[in-house]
Image (tube, rainbow, N blue to C red):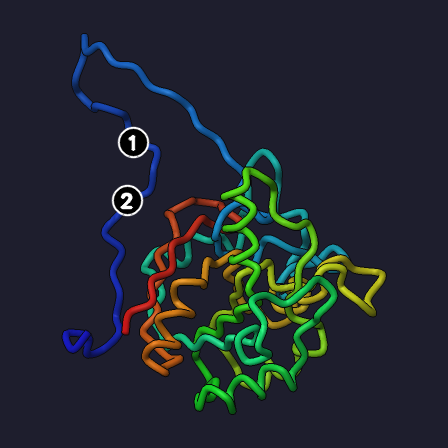
Amino acid sequence: IHMVQTGERYALGDNPGHPLFPGVEMLEWAAEHVAFVFHGQVFTHIDGLAHVFYQGKMYNGRPAALVKASEGATVQTSDVLKDGIMSRGVLLDVARVKGVTTLEPGDHVFPEDLEAAEEAQGVRVEPGDVLLLRTGYGAQVDAAAAAGEPPPAEHSGYNAACLPWIRERDVALLGSDVIQDATPPGDFPKTMLPVHQVTLVALGLRLIDNGHLERLAEACAERNRWEFCLTLNPLRLARGTGSPANPIATF
């Protein structure tokens, strides 16, 4: 990490879409087409600013019509992150601080929970950080997978009351081991995902959904260190509303 001096980043991967073997004829080959949906709770992924709308608008007041089923996102695409992300990451292990393996559905995380985790862990979330929240849902996912069962449909997560706190701390990315929003969302019956709608549409704050934070939480606890270098490289998906991602925490 000492080689990093200015933080400038350069993507080395190319956009997809070139011929398979340009200039080569009479070559026998086989291929397959694979499609997948990464939004929701399937993959660890990053949400772009064209992913969610409120009252027909996305971030900066742009109309939802600029995202089309046939063309994808024509503005604010995930490809703007092609050079990757590197910043200080901070894990707030609210489940561990509360003394439980996992927070139960309905156990919303409030600003006072975030601050209690900061105090217990001796760390403070600062502007430009990548904030990761551990609810312990990853442990439930692992247990369900081992039993050949689906994970619980409902889970803990940020309550919308955290949004002013998140804005005040001015984080660069917001992530967790769930899809950020606690389910059910609580006192916001007119919206299913209030945290998504406010962060993506109003704040321009991208989200890392469904991070697997169990190994990281153990590593942080062993070191008694809850900050690290976090890097993330989304796929180069032109006109994507997000991308699968594999964030890396480096101590």
Pick the front one: 137 or 44: 137
Q: Is residue 228 left or right of residue 240?
A: left
Q: Amino acid at mark 2?
A: Asp
Q: Is residue 88 left or right of residue 183?
A: left
**Residue 18, label in figure:** 1
Q: Is residue 149 above or below residue 84?
A: above
Which residue occupies 37% across, 79% down? 227
**Residue 3, label in figure:** none
In the rendering, at what x and y percent does residue 157 appear?
64, 66
Q: Are marks 1 and 2 in contact (CB under 8 Å)?
A: yes
Q: Check the picture and name the quadrant holding the C terminus.
A: bottom left
User: Which residue is the site of mark 2?
Assistant: 14
Q: Check the picture and name the quadrant holding the N terminus.
A: bottom left
Which residue occupies 50% across, 61% down? 208
In the rendering, at what x and y percent does residue 61 appear?
66, 64
Residue 185 lies in what quarter of the image? bottom right
Q: Amino acid at mark 1?
A: His
Total marks placed: 2
Pick the front one: 95 or 23: 95
